[in-house]
Image: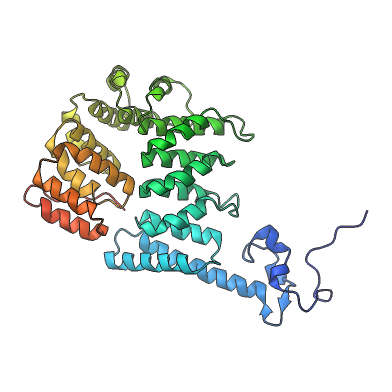
Amino acid sequence: MAAPTNPFVSMASRPTEQTRGLCPALAMYLSCVNCPFVAACPYKTRLGDFGMEAAAQENEARDRARRLIAVLTDEGAADAQRQQAADEVAAWLETDAGLLPHIRGQLAIALGDYGDVRAFEPLVATLGDLRLSEQQSVLREDAALTLGDLNDARACEPLIQWLTDWRPGVRFACAVALGRLGLPEAIPALKSLREVRIGDDFGQLNEQVQEMCLHALALLGEADVREPLEQLLTAERRVALSRAEIVFALGELGDAASVPALEALYASNIGEGLRHYTAIALGRLGRDMREVLRPLLAADDEDLAFHAARALAALGDEVAVEPLVLRGLTCRRGYIRRLAVLALRPFLGQPAVQAALEAYAEQEPVQSLRQRVMQITEPTCTEVPQVSG
């Protein structure tokens, strides 16, 4: 049998018209930066060493991306500076078709986390980009989660499409995102996934995805998941969901049949964090937990404070209006804004709430919306910390 040929042929045997596009290493490493042979690359042309030149260009792109992402994610940066970075990222994503997949994914995720709708198409592209390596596949997961936070109904179709991806992390993230979107058309796909085992995962990875499907279905109001969730709540073994996440899901499901189980948990010897989320769930189900929930509005954990406000709103407590307007409606996460709008519905008779919702409906930039709702609510509200993002 003939000896295998070395793809990295010597300079002497390489035709002079050969170009970088014929380099066999690209099929294995996808870019010159990832290639361990770039320093001794034999694929040179009359323009010089393509490998080293490409590596320099890719390093320059990586440094530029890091700088822009640092500005976008800096909560302390000036709004104008962050918006300028967002505009630059959006323009770069739109015009540079040759941008490396992992750099494109990082930029899209940062832009989406900033709350910019221009991130939608790059995020969808990253979610479905099979060129990303095993180590880079977390970008596909983060892209799915960011699509869920954007609260764009267009995301439902690609998220369902990749809900059966062979990577369990991608399936898990798609299930989380579909739950956050709140669209009932995702229910059949999530229910089907609970019955499917994909790949040789030794069981546990598939179980993690199936547990997260229960959580997502609860957020979508699927009544059939109440009993499985209550069983998980008291189970000795869980592979994905914490008890706080299960409690939260039961509260979102809205089935009063869960009240006895939640009251028994609240009365037991549990940690402070779980107790807080149990109180929130009970409040969402109509139990008067106002004395416990009101102090949580000042909690350092902004998600905890926001969901406490939602529970108080479900109980008709007007103290919830201020944080829901000033934290919820002006949050960069579309998922939080959607929940805030739903929670404020009982208070539509208040002129300040009506005006704030009208301002929100006009889809102003987040910073100008924050200033506007502060002016609207100034006679009745004092300033509160804003949800990060």
Which residue is farthest front?
A: 185
Q: Find residue 134 and report its horizontal and vertical position in percent.
A: 60, 49
Horizontal side of 12 relative to 122 (left or right) equals right
Foreground of the two, 131 or 265: 131
Above or below — where is 276 with respect to 122? above
Q: Residue at x 26, y 57 (%)?
A: 366
Above or below — where is 111 with respect to 171? below
Residue 350 visible in image: yes
Horizontal side of 76 relative to 54 (left or right) equals left
**Coloring applied to the structure:** rainbow
Q: Find residue 160 and report its horizontal and vertical position in percent.
A: 48, 41
Which residue is farthest bottom?
A: 46
Above or below — where is 316 with respect to 93? above
Horizontal side of 155 relative to 322 (left or right) equals right
Q: Residue at x 40, y 23 (%)?
A: 224
Q: Residue at x 14, y 34 (%)?
A: 317
Q: Find residue 88 and report its horizontal and vertical position in percent.
A: 40, 69
Q: Residue at x 54, y 50 (%)?
A: 128
Q: Find residue 90 and report its horizontal and vertical position in percent.
A: 41, 65
Residue 198 quadrant: top right
Residue 68 quadrant: bottom left
Which residue is farthest right?
A: 1
Foreground of the two, 185 or 338: 185
Horizontal side of 375 relative to 361 (left or right) equals left
Above or below — where is 302 with respect to 72? above
Residue 109 visible in image: no
Foreground of the two, 173 or 232: 173
Total number of numbered discs in the rendering:
0
